[in-house]
Amino acid sequence: MLLHNQISIALHTPLIPIKPTLKHHSKNTAVFAQQRNAPPAATNFSISDESLSSRGFTIHRTIDNLDVDQLNTVFVAVGFPRRDTGKIRLALEHTDALLWVEYEKTKRPVAFARATGDGVFNSIIWDVVVDPSFQGIGLGKAVMERLITALLQKGITNIVLYSEPRVLGFYRPMGFVADPDGIRGMVYSRKQKKKK
């Protein structure tokens, strides 16, 4: 997807946890993105840090105080396979930028996204998740807007992400488009072709 324009929509509904919905287990799609416009100002976020705080949420930008076991629970809740927590910690230590949202009442992560890359030109966004009990209230967009802004402020303009096809529409209003200029992503697969 090509990151083209930043679109911010004001949230007019209160941030109230929503009941979980049916989980879908479709395959991920590689999506390409590139920023061509200036990053949004912090005041253009669809939900301000102050608004999140007033609703009982705290934004974190480091792995300090992140309960990796609870994060793993969120991963599983959205359909990711359970991961080894030691490997999650190692991946987080090698992450260039991350954001997570803590629900203050439970002190647990409820939204998360991270990015890795070369720190100069390219970055890949990974593990964009929102606990199903908190989906639909703007937390995913809040995390993505801030993560994209952090990458752009570092001068990184080539941003790639992986997404399930059913949620590509979530990324489009943030400026992402699929297959810019005919460019397609490829993913290495160890699956062997069957011999005929």
Image (spheres, rainbow, N blue to C red):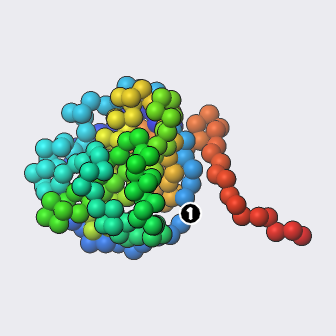
Considering every residue shown, the one lying at the far bottom of the view is: 22
Considering every residue shown, the one lying at the far right of the view is: 196
The residue lying at 70 percent from left, 60 percent from top is 190
Q: Position of residue 23 (x, y in %)?
A: 42, 72
In the picture, the quarter occupied by the C terminus is: bottom right
Q: Position of residue 19 (x, y in %)?
A: 26, 72
Q: Secondary structure at mark 1?
A: loop
The residue lying at 39 percent from left, 57 percent from top is 89
Any part of residue 170 in sight: no
Residue under label 1, please give it. 27
Q: Dot 1: few (<14), some (14–19), or many (≥20) neighbours within 10 Å?
A: few
Q: Is residue 194 above or below residue 93?
A: below
Query: How many circles with numbers are drawn on the protein?
Result: 1
Q: Is residue 67 left or right of residue 95?
A: left
Mark 1 belongs to which amino acid? Lys
Q: Is residue 92 left or right of residue 146?
A: right
Quarter of the rendering containing residue 151: top left
Considering every residue shown, the one lying at the far left of the view is: 54
Quarter of the rendering containing residue 66: bottom left
Residue sitting nearer the eye, 81 or 148: 81
Q: Position of residue 55 (x, y in %)?
A: 13, 55
Residue sitting nearer the eye, 35 or 68: 68
The residue lying at 13 percent from left, 64 percent from top is 105
Any part of residue 150 in sight: yes
Q: Is residue 117 left or right of residue 76?
A: right
Q: Is residue 43 above or below residue 63?
A: above
The residue lying at 64 percent from left, 51 percent from top is 187
Q: Position of residue 57 (x, y in %)?
A: 17, 54
